[in-house]
Image (cartoon, rainbow, N blue to C red):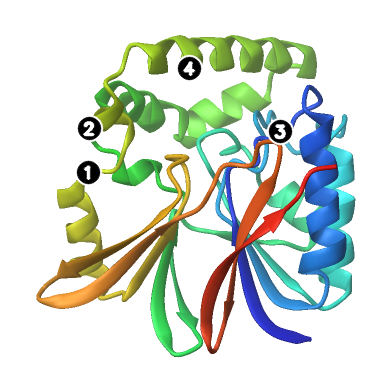
Amino acid sequence: MKPETLFLADLHLSSARPERVRLFQQFAARHARGAEAVYILGDLFDAYIGDDDLAYPAGEVRRCLRELVEGGTRVLFQQGNRDFLVGSGFAVATGAELLDDYAEIDLYGRKALLTHGDLLCIDDLKYHQARARVRTEVWKRQALGKPLWARKLYARWYRFRSFLGKRGNAPEIMDVNAGEVERVFARSGAEVLIHGHTHRPADHDLAADGRPVRRIVLAEWKEEGEFLRWTAEGYCRVRVPGR
């Protein structure tokens, strides 16, 4: 195995974007195979309506992940705001390990904290009200109890409503809250925080409790992909070029 750990988020894979599905397959075959671990920090799918949905691209993605796991690479998945219905069926089918909303890991001697990123954007009050409602076991059980066709219609409506909602929000509401970031660092004692969600890739050097810390924001995948490669020597961002 290669002594490296890879991080990615916000691919938003869907049948409407086959080019992104191909990018992910390229990533899995050329970059992820042989790595120690691959961490997917949410929104792998643009809309995930249940583990029983095997339509394109879910089936292709599952096969890619299963091949990685069978080759010896650990795959760890953290739910995002678009794929929070990923459950035990997905984990069994792929061999991936499901993470909590915040996950602490040892990253070659550095304490790192992983999260999708939406929990850091506390100024988006409407989103967090909706999040609290749909993350309950009662809501998820009722949603997953509906037929697939009904869930697909709801997913389309949700994406449209989300698009309209974002247009009306000020840009700062859609980004992380600096105070919440500082509190998260203080609670966890982490040196590094890695997340996605905001689609604003950057490396932020900060101070928390009088110590230097770094917040690393992963990129959204578009015409090209991008992931973080971390080794004992440090990290770099790696492009996955489109065709």
User: In the rendered structure, which disc, 1 or 2, sits on the residue that comes first in sequence?
Assistant: 2
User: Which residue position holds label 2?
Assistant: 123
Residue pictured at 45% horizontal, 9% vertical: 164
Q: Amino acid at mark 1?
A: Asn
Front disc: 3 or 4: 4
Asked whether, in this view, residue 98 is left or right of residue 1, the answer is left
Q: How far across and down, in percent of the image, does residue 139 sit?
A: 50, 26
Q: Quadrant of the N terminus?
A: bottom right
| Front residue of 52 and 22 | 22
Among numbered discs 2 and 3, the one appearing first in the sequence: 3
**Residues at marks 1 and 2 touching, judged by CB atoms closer than 8 Å:** yes
Q: Quadrant of residue 230?
A: bottom right
For marks 1 and 4 on the same chain, the one whose residue lies earlier in the sequence = 4
Read off the residue under disc 1. 177
Which element type, helix, strand or loop, lies under badge 4?
Answer: helix
Which residue position holds label 4?
162
**Placement of 88 over or under 138, stated as above or below:** below
